[in-house]
Amino acid sequence: MMAGDTASAALGIELAELGAGRAVCRMTVTDQMINGHDLCHGGYVFLLADTAFACACNTDGPVTVAAGAEIAFVSPARAGDVLVAEAAERTRYGRSGIYDVTVRRPDGQVVAEFRGRSRELK
C-alpha cells in the first residue's frame, strides 16, 4: 500500500514499524508545513496519523479504508521536529474497526490523539 501512496511519500512519511493491527510512521516537519503561527499546520499532523492508521488497518489483507476519523490537537510541533505516529487496533467487528493513533514530538510530548474508524471493501 505504501509503495503507491504518493501523498505520504511527497511529505517524506516513512513506515518505521508494521505488525498485526499496528504501525509506526515518522515524518519530519519542514518549513513548507508551517502555518502563520510558526507551528506545524494541523492538516499535516492529521495526514501523518491517517497514514499510520491506514497501515495498521491494512495488515490483515482485505483492502480497508477510513470510514471516519477525528483528532484532538494536544500540543504544537515546529519545523525540524521528527513526529512519530503510533497506531494500534482497538477492536474489529464484522468489516469495521476502531484504531487509535498517538502522535509525539521527539521529546515524547503528545502532539495529537487520533481515532479512526475503518471499513473493509468487498
Image (tube, rainbow, N blue to C red):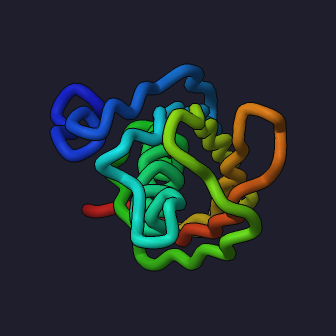
Q: Is residue 83 above or below residue 92?
A: above
Q: Quadrant of residue 64?
A: bottom left
Q: Quadrant of residue 16?
A: top right
- Residue visible at 61% across and 26% down? 19
On screen, residue 101 above or below 26 = below
| Residue 117 versus residue 13 in the image, above or below | below
Q: Position of residue 89 (x, y in %)?
A: 68, 51
Residue 37 placement, left or right of 43: right
Residue 21 visible somewhere in the drawing? no
- 75 or 65, nearer to the observer: 75
Tell me the residue at 44%/64% (across/down): 41
Residue that appears at 26% across and 62% down: 122
Residue 32 vs 24, above or below: the answer is below
* Quarter of the picture holding the N terminus: top left
In the picture provided, is 82 more to the left or to the right than 59? right
Where residue 73 appears, as percent x and y from the top left, is 67, 71
Residue 9, position as x, y percentages in the image = 25, 33
Is 11 left or right of 17, judged from the image as shown?
Answer: left
Between residues 43 and 51, which one lies in front from this camera angle?
43
Numbered label tally: 0
Residue under the point 29% across and 62% down = 121
Q: Is residue 94 visible?
A: yes
